[in-house]
Image: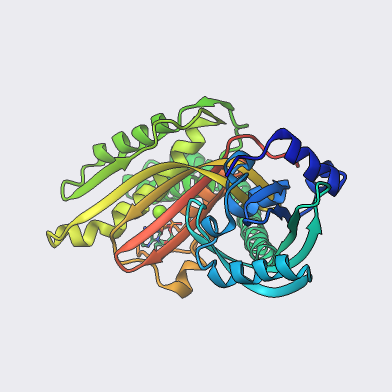
Amino acid sequence: MKSPSRNDQALITAGLGAAALLDQLASAVLVLDGALRIRYLNSATEMLFGASARRLMDTPLHALVSQGESLTERLLEALGSEAPYTERELHLNLESMVDPASVVVDCMVTPIRLTNGARALLLELHQQDRHLRISREENLQTQQQASRAVVRGLAHEIKNPLGGLRGAAQLLDAEIHDPELRDYTRVIMAEADRLQQLVDTLLGSNRLPRMVEVNVHEVMERVRTLVAAEGHPGISVRSNYDPSLPLLRADPDQLIQSVLNIVRNAIEAVLPQSRRHQPAEVVLITRAQRQFTIGHHRHRLVIRVDVVDNGPGIPADFAEQIFYPMVTGRAEGTGLGLSIAQDLIGRHGGTIECHSRPGETRFSIFLPLQQAQK
Ligand SMILES: Nc1ncnc2c1ncn2[C@@H]1O[C@H](COP(=O)(O)OP(=O)(O)O)[C@@H](O)[C@H]1O
Ligand SMILES: [Mg+2]
């Protein structure tokens, strides 16, 4: 089979009319030739399949969709009979995505004739579950932001009187000379300082982010050095990086803080098993991921940082809550680590997700390469 000439493509585009308009559609629109190879596609098709036009063009549909036989049959039938049909809630297993995924689409098939008389099929695929997923994620993010705002407001209210309290204790301390009584003022000051620290953590940094070009692997290695210095001999911290990742515009300190919070949690999760001399392992992974939606923005390329541990996992009902501030599963925890990490990554236009089962917990940080236009 010869590959499509410029001429073929021109015929197709001419047949369809304004291709630029089709690129604005949220539905995937594609044209298949008699052999069901893709001969035209719009931008939404690239997003649906998670691959570039260059890679998709000329590819037979069955190479992209794994359970394609029955679909292929129906398409060939439509091609032969030139009768249009619609198929609702078609489950497509997409082969070419980074993580093989199943999507649910409504599929409209219209047989057409190209201007050179050849038969072809116009396909319109409208993804159903995408909107559900986005609105669910958005709700969750809004709730997390709201609860962070409450905590911050509360911390603010505590901060001011706390300063007064500590100042007064200090004055009193200077006035009294009985060492036994001074023990009390010292306790007040020490506890006020401790509270002050907590309040400062709750408020988070007010510093504006310092955006520079960052190599994500320098961030990862920095985190590795920091946790290595904390000394956990029974725990192996391994890395699995994609060295070809491009630089990222970000605040390195905030990235280090976020990854560190997640890695510390992973270490804490595997600590008990390492003490029992069972394998305890944390793996740091970096990858490029094409076509990823954060909020309402679809990004062509994001950097994905995974922190995977082989600890006991997070129970499903608890996993929903862990990104909220002050939610902790540990006696000595503050419940701030993940909330702060989510906040900092959010400021970079990114997001954090968690998938967990016993023996494998994976936190994934997604960082867009360019800030999306808001
Ligand atoms: N890798 C993990 N494995 C198991 N549980 C985890 C993991 N990461 C986080 N968690 C759970 O999420 C909770 C919240 O984490 P975080 O916000 O960092 O607060 P903290 O560490 O102070 O408890 C933890 O207390 C723990 O129960
Ligand atoms: Mg923590």
- Left or right: 280 in relation to 45: left
Residue 88 position in % (x across, y down): 70, 75
Q: Position of residue 53 (x, y in %)?
A: 64, 42
Residue 183 in sight from this viewpoint: yes
Position of residue 243 in the picture relative to residue 66 (left or right): left
Residue lying at the far top in this picture: please name it: 213
Q: Nearer the viewer, residue 322 or 111?
A: 111
Is residue 107 among what the camera can see?
A: no
Q: Residue at x 76, y 42 (%)?
A: 374
Percent position of residue 351, x then y:
56, 50
Determine whether, in the image, residue 225 is placed left or right of residue 190: left
Image coordinates for residue 321, horizontal then vertical, percent: 52, 67
Name the quarter where the N terminus is drawn.
top right
Q: In the rendered image of this protein, does residue 56 appear above or below residue 122?
A: above
Quarter assignment of residue 78: bottom right
Residue furthest left as drawn: 277
- Looking at the image, which residue is at 62% across and 46% down? 160
Give the farthest residue toward the right. 17
Res. 278 image quadrant: bottom left
Q: Picture quarter containing residue 57?
A: top right
Q: Which residue is at 29% across, 52% downward?
A: 267
- Does 206 sit above or below residue 280? above
| Ligand 1 location (quadrant) | bottom left
